[in-house]
Image: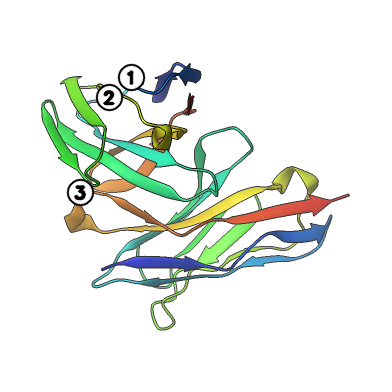
Amino acid sequence: SQTIHQWPATLVQPVGSPLSLECTVEGTSNPNLYWYRQAAGRGLQLLFYSVGIGQISSEVPQNLSASRPQDRQFILSSKKLLLSDSGFYLCAWSVPPLYEQYFGPGTRLTVT
Amino acid sequence: GDSVTQMEGPVTLSEEACLTINCTYTATGYPSLFWYVQYPGEGLQLLLKATKADDKGSNKGFEATYRKETTSFHLEKGSVQVSDSAVYFCALSQYNQGGKLIFGQGTELSVKP
Protein backbone atom coordinates (compact mmCIF):
# COMPACT_ATOMS: atom_id res chain seq x y z
CA SER A 1 0.00 0.00 0.00
CA GLN A 2 1.02 3.59 -0.49
CA THR A 3 2.28 5.82 2.29
CA ILE A 4 3.44 9.39 2.42
CA HIS A 5 5.90 10.81 4.90
CA GLN A 6 6.70 14.36 5.84
CA TRP A 7 9.37 15.70 8.13
CA PRO A 8 9.93 17.34 10.35
CA ALA A 9 6.56 17.29 12.07
CA THR A 10 7.12 20.64 13.74
CA LEU A 11 9.68 23.36 13.20
CA VAL A 12 10.40 26.69 14.83
CA GLN A 13 12.72 28.92 12.82
CA PRO A 14 13.83 32.55 13.14
CA VAL A 15 13.09 35.10 10.46
CA GLY A 16 15.77 35.09 7.79
CA SER A 17 16.80 31.48 8.29
CA PRO A 18 16.63 28.85 5.52
CA LEU A 19 14.01 26.15 5.25
CA SER A 20 13.89 22.64 3.91
CA LEU A 21 10.81 20.43 4.25
CA GLU A 22 10.84 16.96 2.79
CA CYS A 23 8.09 14.70 1.52
CA THR A 24 8.47 11.15 0.30
CA VAL A 25 5.95 8.70 -1.10
CA GLU A 26 6.22 4.92 -0.97
CA GLY A 27 4.38 2.24 -2.88
CA THR A 28 3.68 4.05 -6.14
CA SER A 29 5.56 5.22 -9.20
CA ASN A 30 5.53 8.52 -11.07
CA PRO A 31 2.98 10.22 -8.85
CA ASN A 32 1.90 13.81 -9.16
CA LEU A 33 3.13 15.64 -6.07
CA TYR A 34 1.74 18.76 -4.42
CA TRP A 35 2.68 21.23 -1.69
CA TYR A 36 -0.07 23.13 0.13
CA ARG A 37 -0.01 25.66 2.92
CA GLN A 38 -2.78 25.99 5.43
CA ALA A 39 -2.69 29.23 7.35
CA ALA A 40 -4.68 29.90 10.50
CA GLY A 41 -8.33 29.86 9.54
CA ARG A 42 -8.12 26.53 7.71
CA GLY A 43 -7.99 27.57 4.03
CA LEU A 44 -5.68 25.52 1.82
CA GLN A 45 -3.45 27.18 -0.71
CA LEU A 46 -1.71 25.19 -3.44
CA LEU A 47 1.92 26.29 -3.62
CA PHE A 48 3.58 23.92 -6.09
CA TYR A 49 2.86 20.79 -8.02
CA SER A 50 5.00 18.39 -9.99
CA VAL A 51 4.13 15.83 -12.65
CA GLY A 52 7.65 14.37 -12.89
CA ILE A 53 11.29 14.62 -11.84
CA GLY A 54 12.55 18.16 -12.25
CA GLN A 55 9.13 19.43 -13.36
CA ILE A 56 7.77 22.05 -10.98
CA SER A 57 4.82 24.37 -11.45
CA SER A 58 4.43 27.31 -9.12
CA GLU A 59 0.95 28.46 -8.29
CA VAL A 60 1.73 31.46 -6.13
CA PRO A 61 4.84 33.62 -6.50
CA GLN A 62 6.44 33.96 -3.10
CA ASN A 63 9.38 33.33 -0.88
CA LEU A 64 9.39 29.58 -1.42
CA SER A 65 10.69 27.12 -4.00
CA ALA A 66 10.22 23.43 -4.64
CA SER A 67 12.32 20.68 -6.14
CA ARG A 68 11.80 17.07 -7.12
CA PRO A 69 15.18 15.37 -7.23
CA GLN A 70 13.75 11.86 -7.30
CA ASP A 71 10.51 10.33 -8.50
CA ARG A 72 8.96 10.06 -5.06
CA GLN A 73 10.68 12.93 -3.25
CA PHE A 74 9.41 16.49 -3.09
CA ILE A 75 11.23 19.25 -1.23
CA LEU A 76 9.99 22.68 -0.21
CA SER A 77 12.67 25.28 0.44
CA SER A 78 13.30 28.87 1.29
CA LYS A 79 16.52 30.84 1.48
CA LYS A 80 15.18 33.37 3.98
CA LEU A 81 12.01 32.80 5.96
CA LEU A 82 9.48 35.54 6.59
CA LEU A 83 6.98 35.75 9.43
CA SER A 84 4.23 35.23 6.88
CA ASP A 85 5.67 31.81 6.00
CA SER A 86 4.29 30.38 9.25
CA GLY A 87 1.64 27.76 8.73
CA PHE A 88 0.83 24.10 8.32
CA TYR A 89 2.50 22.63 5.22
CA LEU A 90 0.93 19.63 3.61
CA CYS A 91 2.32 17.38 0.91
CA ALA A 92 0.02 15.26 -1.23
CA TRP A 93 0.22 12.76 -4.08
CA SER A 94 -2.06 11.49 -6.78
CA VAL A 95 -1.80 9.13 -9.72
CA PRO A 96 -3.48 9.99 -13.01
CA PRO A 97 -6.12 9.46 -14.19
CA LEU A 98 -7.58 9.06 -10.71
CA TYR A 99 -7.07 12.52 -9.34
CA GLU A 100 -7.98 12.07 -5.72
CA GLN A 101 -5.09 13.29 -3.64
CA TYR A 102 -3.68 11.65 -0.53
CA PHE A 103 -2.14 13.87 2.08
CA GLY A 104 0.78 13.52 4.42
CA PRO A 105 0.62 14.30 8.16
CA GLY A 106 1.92 17.84 7.65
CA THR A 107 4.67 20.04 9.05
CA ARG A 108 3.77 22.87 11.39
CA LEU A 109 6.18 25.75 10.80
CA THR A 110 6.42 28.71 13.15
CA VAL A 111 8.63 31.57 12.11
CA THR A 112 9.64 33.76 15.05
CA GLY B 1 -12.21 30.25 -12.83
CA ASP B 2 -13.40 27.19 -11.00
CA SER B 3 -14.46 27.59 -7.38
CA VAL B 4 -16.05 25.77 -4.45
CA THR B 5 -18.30 27.34 -1.83
CA GLN B 6 -19.17 25.70 1.48
CA MET B 7 -21.56 26.68 4.18
CA GLU B 8 -20.13 28.76 6.96
CA GLY B 9 -19.22 27.11 10.20
CA PRO B 10 -18.82 26.22 12.92
CA VAL B 11 -21.65 23.71 13.00
CA THR B 12 -22.50 22.40 16.44
CA LEU B 13 -24.69 19.32 16.81
CA SER B 14 -25.68 16.89 19.50
CA GLU B 15 -24.70 13.27 19.17
CA GLU B 16 -27.06 11.29 16.92
CA ALA B 17 -28.31 14.41 15.14
CA CYS B 18 -28.51 14.58 11.34
CA LEU B 19 -25.79 16.42 9.48
CA THR B 20 -25.85 18.32 6.21
CA ILE B 21 -22.92 20.45 5.04
CA ASN B 22 -23.72 22.32 1.86
CA CYS B 23 -21.24 22.53 -0.98
CA THR B 24 -21.75 24.15 -4.37
CA TYR B 25 -19.27 24.55 -7.16
CA THR B 26 -18.61 26.58 -10.28
CA ALA B 27 -16.71 24.79 -13.00
CA THR B 28 -16.59 24.24 -16.72
CA GLY B 29 -16.93 20.72 -17.99
CA TYR B 30 -17.28 17.74 -15.70
CA PRO B 31 -15.09 17.96 -12.62
CA SER B 32 -14.57 15.23 -10.07
CA LEU B 33 -15.84 16.10 -6.60
CA PHE B 34 -14.43 15.18 -3.20
CA TRP B 35 -14.99 15.54 0.51
CA TYR B 36 -11.96 15.58 2.76
CA VAL B 37 -11.88 15.53 6.56
CA GLN B 38 -9.20 17.03 8.80
CA TYR B 39 -8.97 16.03 12.45
CA PRO B 40 -7.17 18.43 14.80
CA GLY B 41 -3.45 18.61 14.13
CA GLU B 42 -3.56 16.14 11.27
CA GLY B 43 -3.41 16.12 7.49
CA LEU B 44 -6.44 15.75 5.27
CA GLN B 45 -8.09 12.39 4.69
CA LEU B 46 -10.16 11.57 1.64
CA LEU B 47 -13.67 10.86 2.92
CA LEU B 48 -15.56 10.21 -0.31
CA LYS B 49 -15.63 11.09 -3.98
CA ALA B 50 -17.83 11.18 -7.08
CA THR B 51 -16.56 11.42 -10.62
CA LYS B 52 -19.70 11.95 -12.69
CA ALA B 53 -23.20 13.32 -12.44
CA ASP B 54 -25.62 11.39 -10.19
CA ASP B 55 -22.77 9.38 -8.64
CA LYS B 56 -23.14 8.92 -4.90
CA GLY B 57 -20.01 8.71 -2.81
CA SER B 58 -20.23 7.09 0.60
CA ASN B 59 -17.92 6.18 3.46
CA LYS B 60 -18.19 5.77 7.24
CA GLY B 61 -21.90 6.63 7.15
CA PHE B 62 -21.34 9.84 5.18
CA GLU B 63 -22.89 10.33 1.75
CA ALA B 64 -22.81 12.94 -0.99
CA THR B 65 -24.46 12.94 -4.42
CA TYR B 66 -23.02 14.73 -7.46
CA ARG B 67 -25.87 16.97 -8.66
CA LYS B 68 -24.93 18.63 -11.91
CA GLU B 69 -28.25 20.41 -12.33
CA THR B 70 -27.75 22.26 -9.05
CA THR B 71 -23.91 22.14 -9.13
CA SER B 72 -23.93 20.76 -5.62
CA PHE B 73 -22.26 18.01 -3.60
CA HIS B 74 -23.78 18.24 -0.11
CA LEU B 75 -22.34 16.04 2.64
CA GLU B 76 -24.87 14.15 4.79
CA LYS B 77 -24.86 11.79 7.70
CA GLY B 78 -27.89 10.42 9.46
CA SER B 79 -26.47 10.19 12.97
CA VAL B 80 -23.26 11.95 13.95
CA GLN B 81 -20.89 10.88 16.70
CA VAL B 82 -18.51 12.85 18.89
CA SER B 83 -15.67 11.30 16.87
CA ASP B 84 -16.96 13.04 13.73
CA SER B 85 -15.85 16.40 15.13
CA ALA B 86 -13.43 17.78 12.55
CA VAL B 87 -13.11 20.23 9.68
CA TYR B 88 -14.68 19.12 6.41
CA PHE B 89 -13.49 20.33 3.01
CA CYS B 90 -15.31 20.08 -0.28
CA ALA B 91 -13.07 20.08 -3.37
CA LEU B 92 -13.09 19.63 -7.11
CA SER B 93 -10.51 18.68 -9.69
CA GLN B 94 -10.41 18.87 -13.44
CA TYR B 95 -8.85 16.18 -15.57
CA ASN B 96 -7.16 18.72 -17.84
CA GLN B 97 -5.57 20.69 -15.00
CA GLY B 98 -3.08 18.17 -13.70
CA GLY B 99 -5.33 16.98 -10.93
CA LYS B 100 -5.06 20.19 -8.96
CA LEU B 101 -7.64 20.39 -6.22
CA ILE B 102 -9.70 23.50 -5.65
CA PHE B 103 -10.93 23.56 -2.06
CA GLY B 104 -13.78 25.23 -0.32
CA GLN B 105 -12.97 27.16 2.81
CA GLY B 106 -13.80 24.27 5.14
CA THR B 107 -16.61 23.77 7.64
CA GLU B 108 -15.86 22.99 11.25
CA LEU B 109 -18.15 20.44 12.86
CA SER B 110 -18.38 20.04 16.61
CA VAL B 111 -20.48 17.18 18.01
CA LYS B 112 -21.43 17.33 21.68
CA PRO B 113 -22.27 14.26 23.76
Where residue A17 appears, as percent x and y from the top left, is: 34, 17
Q: Residues within 10 Å of mark 1 (few under 14, many from 20)?
A: some
Amino acid carrying mark 1 in the image: Leu
Check disc 2 and report its element: helix, strand or loop.
strand
Q: Are marks 2 and 1 in contact (CB under 8 Å)?
A: yes
Asked if residue B64 is positioned above or below residue A34 in the image, the reply reads: below
Do the dots labelled 2 and 3 sit on one chain?
Answer: no
Find disc 3 in the rendering and name its residue: B98
Question: How would you rate the neighbour count of disc 3 (Cα within 10 Å): few for under 14, some for 14-19, many for 20 or more?
Answer: some
Q: Which residue is mark 2?
A: A78
- Disc 2 crowd rating (10 Å Cα; few below 14, some 14-19, many 20+) is some
Q: Chain of mark 3?
A: B
What type is the residue that disc 3 sits on? Gly
**Residue A54, above or below B7:** above
Identified at 37% across, 39% down, the residue is A36
**Residue pictured at 53% horizontal, 48% vertical:** A42
Chain letter of disc 2 in the image: A
Residue sitting farthest toward the bottom: B69
Q: In this rendering, does residue A90 appear at all?
A: no
Work out whether residue A64 or residue B46 is closer to the camera in this orientation and state it. Answer: A64
Q: Position of residue A52 (x, y in %)?
A: 14, 31
Q: Position of residue B34 (x, y in %)?
A: 44, 56
Snapshot colouring: rainbow
Q: State the residue in front, B39 or B95.
A: B39
The vertical placement of B26 against A7, above or below, is below
Q: Quadrant of residue B29?
A: bottom left
Amino acid carrying mark 2 in the image = Ser
| A55 versus B84 height, above or below | above
Disc sitting over residue A19 in the figure: 1
Quadrant location of residue B68?
bottom left
Q: Position of residue B83 (x, y in %)?
A: 74, 42
Secondary structure of the residue carrying tag 1 is: strand
